[in-house]
Image (cartoon, rainbow, N blue to C red):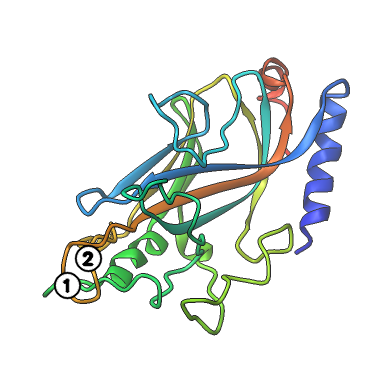
Amino acid sequence: MSFPSLLRGAYDRASSLFPDFVISRQVLRMEQSLANNKSAYSFQLKQGNASTDPPLSVLLNDSDAFVLCALSIGIKKQDTTKSPQQVGNFTVYNYVNSAIFTGVPAGQATEAASLECIYNGKLSFRTGSLERIRPTDTREYKQAPDIQTATISPFGGFGDFGRAWVEQQPTLLIDGSQNNEFTLQLGAGDYTGIAGNYTSGGATTNTALNVLVLQCLGLVIQNGAQAAKRFADSWKA
């Protein structure tokens, strides 16, 4: 699969519908802390839906439109107990690296086993009440290298050729002024260690906790929200 050609095709279609707009490649990023008492996570594409957006978030402006071409589901750690907070100091993995996620709750599923529920779940997307992506298996979003260590990078890169991206077809045209929401439903299982607070010795003292990362690869159309509404029913990429 060639991502440059995927983006080129989407760009050609978008530029013909938005000939007087600035269109550029964009990666949107949404994050949520994992919790052992939570089985579903919702991600809003729109800026300002929460009182405080996570610091690494890249969200869609109300006035812009976005063409969704590919998605990735990742996991990272962050430690907000440090000063300064260690939010961007950890690698995002698109699989469960057992050398990194090492917690062992006594008598329960390990941290790594709990995290596998992310990649045995379902991902869906809706705009308002309209379900635009029906719940789809998240297994294909798990992209693991053959060798896993605590220091190896997830892949050679996370660019257009990175295996972590999963192509979306048809490409969706999204209006930033609307309520656009992804929902990730975890697979049924034991979530005891999913937050990452357990150590390898079984104590609940680990302060580097787990965060779910959803990223969208596509094209942002600056100030294209009104035009996106206009073409929402007629354009299928």
Foreground: 201 or 26?
201
Q: Name the outermost residue toward the left.
A: 107
Q: Which mark is residue 51?
A: none
Q: Which mark is residue 198?
A: 2
Residue in the image at 31% along x and 46% along y: 40
Foreground: 173 or 163?
163
**Residue 138 picture location, percent across and down:** 46, 59
Q: How many marks?
A: 2
Going by the numbered disc 1, the residue's amino acid type is: Gly
Mark 2 vs 1: CB contact within 8 A: yes
Residue 37 vertical position relative to residue 193 in the rendered view, above or below: above
Q: Is residue 210 left or right of residue 24?
A: left
Going by the numbered disc 2, the residue's amino acid type is: Tyr
Density class for disc 2 (Cα within 10 Å; few <14, some 14-19, many ≥20) is many
Q: Is residue 130 left or right of residue 170?
A: left
Q: Mark 1: which secondary structure?
A: loop
**Residue 91 picture location, percent across and down:** 51, 62
Q: Mark 2: which secondary structure?
A: loop
Residue in the image at 78% along x and 42% along y: 10
Residue in the image at 35% along x and 44% along y: 41
Foreground: 164 or 232?
164
Residue 181 vertical position relative to residue 203 in the rendered view, above or below: above
Q: Quadrant of the C terminus?
A: top right
Residue 129 vertical position relative to residue 132 in the rendered view, above or below: above
**Residue 152 picture location, percent across and down:** 55, 77
**Residue 70 picture location, percent across and down:** 64, 50
Q: Quadrant of the N terminus?
A: bottom right
Q: Name the outermost residue toward the bottom.
A: 147
Where does label 1 land, which residue?
A: 202
Density class for disc 1 (Cα within 10 Å; few <14, some 14-19, many ≥20) is some
Q: CA distance from mark 2 to mark 1?
A: 6 Å
Image quadrant assignment for residue 143: bottom right
